[in-house]
Amino acid sequence: MKRYLPFIIIALVLAGAVVITLTLWRRGTSGDGSNISNSSTAAQSSNNAAAPGQPPTNSAGLTKPNVKVSSPVVLEEYGDYQCPPCGALYPELKKIEGEYGDQLRIVFHHFPLMKMHKNALAAAHAAEAARNQNKFWEMHDRLYRNQKEWVDQEDPRPTFIGYARELKLNAEQFKRDMDSNQVDQRISADIQRGSAAGVTGTPTVFIDNQMLRYEATNAEGLRRGINLMLERKATS
């Protein structure tokens, strides 16, 4: 028995070492896994929640800069009332206008693509005739919201006169103004101005005189451009 005792002691020492090693390895593995999981969760929570004091994100997931500017960013759209992409952009511009308030001023310029859209020029005349009675934006909204109603009509003028009556405009004056040289000249001036600035299609958007790439002329691209200009104004 005595001659086996050293071997028994060695075996017990080795077994104890194995147990200790396994225990330490399990603790280390558990600790590393816990740190990774917690860090990942914390990062996700940080990304999803706005930091205290920061403005909330808008519908495109972009944070509106919390800056004060002495003058608003000017967004100019060259549009065609019969253009489908213009019609799709219209509700996004309305949302953006509401989000930015007095930090943004939107200007609309007529650029009817008459070779492609037979009723685009008549619609532009309707909007400008409404301007003569201080209802340009109200007519603008109706033309875009009801685009599908009049785009294929042989003569959309009765529809536009109906919109004028809904807006409680003087219908007789509205009819005269739609055919007036004054209205025609304003639309022609917009077309000439757009052509000189490099406009070839619609919608074309300028943000503080910088033309937005066509592929960026969407809700996210517009907000990014506006945010950039707001930050520039704040630091200039």
Image: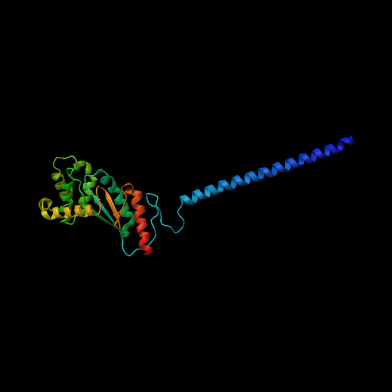
- What colouring style does the render use? rainbow
Query: Is 189 on the left or on the right of 54, as rendered?
Result: left
Residue 209 placed where, x, y %? 29, 57
Q: Is residue 148 visible?
A: yes
Instruction: Point out the image quarter for the C terminus.
Output: bottom left
Query: Is 58 on the left or on the right of 140, as rendered?
Result: right
Which quadrant of the figure has residue 232? bottom left
Residue 206 placed where, x, y %? 29, 54
Query: Is 76 on the left or on the right of 67, as rendered?
Result: left
Q: Is residue 137 visible?
A: no
Q: Nearer the viewer, residue 98 or 47?
A: 47
Task: Give the mark count.
Answer: 0
Which quadrant of the figure has residue 4? top right
Instruction: Point out the image quarter for the N terminus.
Output: top right
Position of 148 relative to 73 (above/below): above
Residue 103 placed where, x, y %? 32, 59
Q: Nearer the viewer, residue 179 or 100?
A: 179
Position of 6 relative to 103 (above/below): above
Position of 123 relative to 209 (above/below): above
Q: Residue furthest right?
A: 2
Task: Tell me what residue is drawn at x 35 percent, y 59 percent.
Answer: 230
Position of 235 relative to 43 (above/below): below
Task: Tell me what residue is drawn at x 24 percent, y 46 percent.
Answer: 145
Residue 181 placed where, x, y %? 11, 54
